[in-house]
Amino acid sequence: MTDRKEFRDLAPPAEAHGTIASLDLEPEPETVPLEDARGRVLAERMDAAIDVPGFDRATLDGYAVRGRDTFGADEVDPVALELVGEVHAGEAPDESVGEGECVEISTGAVMPPGADAMVPVEQTDEGDDGEILFRKSVAPGDNVMLAGADVAAGERALGPGTRLTPREIGLLSALGVDEVPVRGRPTVGIVSTGDELVRPGDPLEHDRGQIHDVNSYAIASAVEEVGGDPRLYPHAGDDVEELERILREAAAECDLVLSSGSTSASAVDVIYRVIEDSGELLLHGVAVKPGKPMLVGRLEGGAYVGLPGYPVSALTIFRTFVAPAIRRAAGLPEPQTATVSGTMLSRVRYSEGRRRFLPVGLVEDGWGTTRVYPVDKGSGATTSLVEADGVVDVDPDTEYLGESETVTVQLFSPDVRPPTLFGVGEDDPVLSRLLDRLDRPRYLAVGSREGLRRLRNGVPDVAVTAGPVDREVDAETLGSWTRNWGLVVPAGNPEEIGGLDDLVDRDLRLINRTTDSGLRTTLANAVAGLADERGETRRDLEAAIDGWDLAARAHESPARNVAAGDADAGLGLGATAEALGLGFVPLGEQVVRVHANPDRTGKASVGALEEAIEDVDSVLDDLPGYQ
């Protein structure tokens, strides 16, 4: 009579999860073409190498003008400007805009030199002798999307651990990325056992009790669904030597080997002995139904899991215990349902009488409640897709969504989950590196001023500022560091720029930052100090600086304009200048502070960021001009 191996001391489910979690399934990262990257997970941070758009462009059809030439225009007393040309999307402007002139422009077209604003065509009329009558005045920047307004060069575009859906693929395409560093997909070898199994396509001998091999294909599909790379191996039968040979071959080539069948206590279940002889058996049997006969072990140093033979049991055990381990190895989150309920963080007005799909983001508050906030950077912004987790279907008769009102969010994907940490504020290289140490953070580089405004409204977990804070903020400071700021100049500083005096007194062109930027505020304060020394007004000195109102969105954009020869100096950081091989004229030091929402200080992710900041010295060592 043949000895039978009995199940003893069936492991509880928690132990089975822990045992499988202890197996090392994570493969090495790899680089794949962008067209093959959908569904993969980024292995490292992706920074924008270019501005998107790479040029100042019109947002509507109309006329490109100098904003100052339209001042005072209204319905009663329109301003007449001479039409000197036209420019359409996809072509370079042939004409520049001088005093008293305008150029007809199409949506998306490059703003011609000299123009700093545009007037929509519906706010104009055709006059006599080639003149255009303007019935509304505009300020510089009106109806213009600045270069880098969507994504700015040097900005943290996507972080490690981001799953690449069509939204992210679109963003990477806009950035010109053609290859993507991704986490490897764990290779999973699949071996079916049992003399009764026959591969689909081969004839069955029913009198011998043969059945088609269902598990190999069903499990392979399930492996692929959760992020693994399935590899089918030849059917092994119940021959001990052949089974051991196939198992060893699969173990040498794969991160995980799965077998199905031959895991019960029957005498013909030889896998038990194969694993004991060739590796280490960690678990045999789990206290669940269906699926009690499960093996977990190591084979030739690799990972092995034996699934039950019945297809329903095999798939149940796979999805319950093995699928989470494969997802973790591939960097994929656990799936969620396609909709989620949450409460609005702020009131959103809407009274256009049309059905609206409101893009929204999700964030958990300090009590674990899902909160919903609107995301809207304009219909032309690619990053709105990445920042939004789903949409709220707003009924045409709805005039507003109230603060704390419960809404249903239709997720873009069942795999969407709220970010563990939601931050806004100043763009900074140190911050980007600290965020890399967190699990699934989301950070929007909206500038210091806008970051504080959103923090006061209670939306983000943290806000980051650079330079002085001009208004009181109810927040807890998690930490800070300092950075050198000043003027980025061409290598060798050919114009021999020494400081702000040169920008005021000489014919030099500056690229500034936007008004929300902490760098812009710090520069404005320095100009004010220089004005006091000279006995002049700050406004006079700003007007004397060529390009004071030429604003770039992210910290690296002015430097890249300098590198391209478009300016003599750009407002920026010493670290940026060195990274791009440019010169640098230091003007001072600036403190970067991380402020926590007082209602979110108990969140685990906020604590994790605070711990990362405590270790900030390890990041500062690699960035010149920081301390």
Image (cartoon, rainbow, N blue to C red):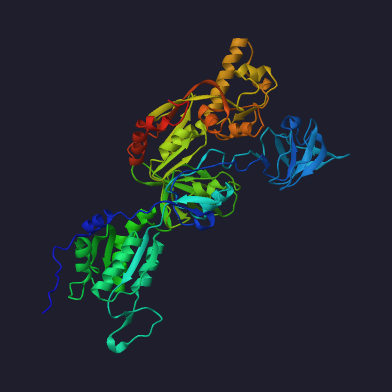
Q: Nearer the viewer, residue 434 or 525?
A: 434
Q: Nearer the viewer, residue 141 or 97?
A: 97
Query: Whole-percent x and y of residue 575?
Result: 50, 29
- Is 347 located above or below residue 191 in the figure? above
The C terminus sits in image quarter: top left
Single out the residue that lies furthest toward the left. 1
Q: Quadrant of residue 82?
A: top right
- Please indicate, yes or no, whether residue 397 appears anywhere in the rendered image: no
Q: Quadrant of residue 622?
A: top left
Single out the residue that lies furthest toward the right. 129
Q: Nearer the viewer, residue 497 or 425?
A: 497
The N terminus sits in image quarter: bottom left
Single out the residue that lies furthest toward the bottom. 207
Query: Whole-percent x and y of residue 291?
Result: 24, 68
- Is 504 located above or below residue 233 in the figure? above
Q: How many circles with numbers are drawn on the protein?
A: 0
- Quick check: 365 left or right of 424? left
- Please indicate, yes or no, whether residue 255 appears anywhere in the rendered image: yes
Q: Nearer the viewer, residue 203 or 254?
A: 254
- Is 306 located above or below residue 590 in the figure? below
- Quick check: 23 left or right of 575? left
Q: Residue at x 31, y 62 (%)?
A: 251
Q: Quadrant of residue 299?
A: bottom left
Query: Whole-percent x and y of residue 71?
Result: 74, 30
Query: Whole-percent x and y of residue 259?
Result: 29, 68
